[in-house]
Amino acid sequence: VQVVESGGGLVQPGGSLRLSCTASGFSANSYTRWDRQAPGKERELVAAISTVGGTTTYAASVKGRFTISRDNAKNTVYLQMNNLNPEDTAIYYCNVEGWVLGSYSAYWGQGTQVTVSS
């Protein structure tokens, strides 16, 4: 099982980034979430999406600026982040829940750094 994030980087305030999370090794996955952890702060949910139906959830702090979407054919979930501000600086982690060898489990990726700074 692999969960791989990409797309992080350095961006100026007001800029945009798109993060990708690609999962492999699942016989079926049901739910994907993006969390973030800023220095000295607890990890928090940013956005989540279900595989079937595409139901989405957003943290209040990102609603209207971030959009989570998925391409089931590519087993990839995207997080489009617009109008970024310094408070969005964090390591962003992807978590995928699904079935692996008959067991339902959740797996984290290694994280990708997002830095918003002028």
Image (cartoon, rainbow, N blue to C red):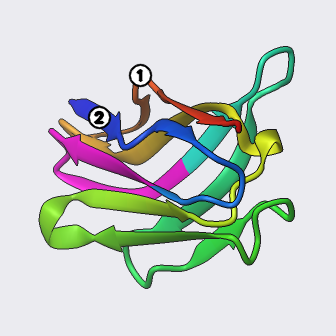
What residue sits 76% from the left and 26% below the top?
38
Seen from the viewer's position, the closer of residues 39 and 23 is: 39
Q: Relative to 57, is 21 above or below? A: above
Q: Residues within 10 Å of mark 2 (few under 14, many from 20)?
A: some
Which is nearer the eye, 117 or 73?
117
**x 79%, y 41%: residue:** 86
Q: Which mark sits nearer the N-terminus, 2 or 1?
A: 2
On the rendered structure, is 90 left or right of 79? Answer: right
Range of magenta residues: 18-33
Residue pointed to by mark 1: 110
Q: Position of residue 118 (x, y in %)?
A: 71, 38
- Kindly report the distance in space between the C-alpha atoms of the residues bearing marks 2 and 1: 7 Å
In the displayed structure image, the side of residue 60 where residue 76 appears, left or right: left
Q: Residue sitting at 22 percent across and 70 percent down?
A: 72
* In the image, residue 26 above or below residue 101: below
User: What label does residue 4 carry, if any?
Assistant: 2
Left or right, 95 with reference to 7: right
Task: Judge the density around disc 1: few (<14), some (14-19), many (≥20) Cα neighbours within 10 Å.
Answer: some
The amino acid marked with disc number 2 is: Val
Q: Amino acid at mark 1?
A: Gln
Query: Would you say residue 27 sits in the magenta stretch?
Result: yes
Q: Are marks 2 and 1 in contact (CB under 8 Å)?
A: yes
Residue 29 shows which numbered tag?
none
As drawn, 74 above or below 87 = below
Q: Residue furthest top?
A: 40
| Residue 61 in which image quadrant | bottom right
Where residue 99 appears, as percent x and y from the top left, is: 29, 46
Give the SS element for disc 2: strand
Query: Which one is in front, 115 or 36?
Result: 115
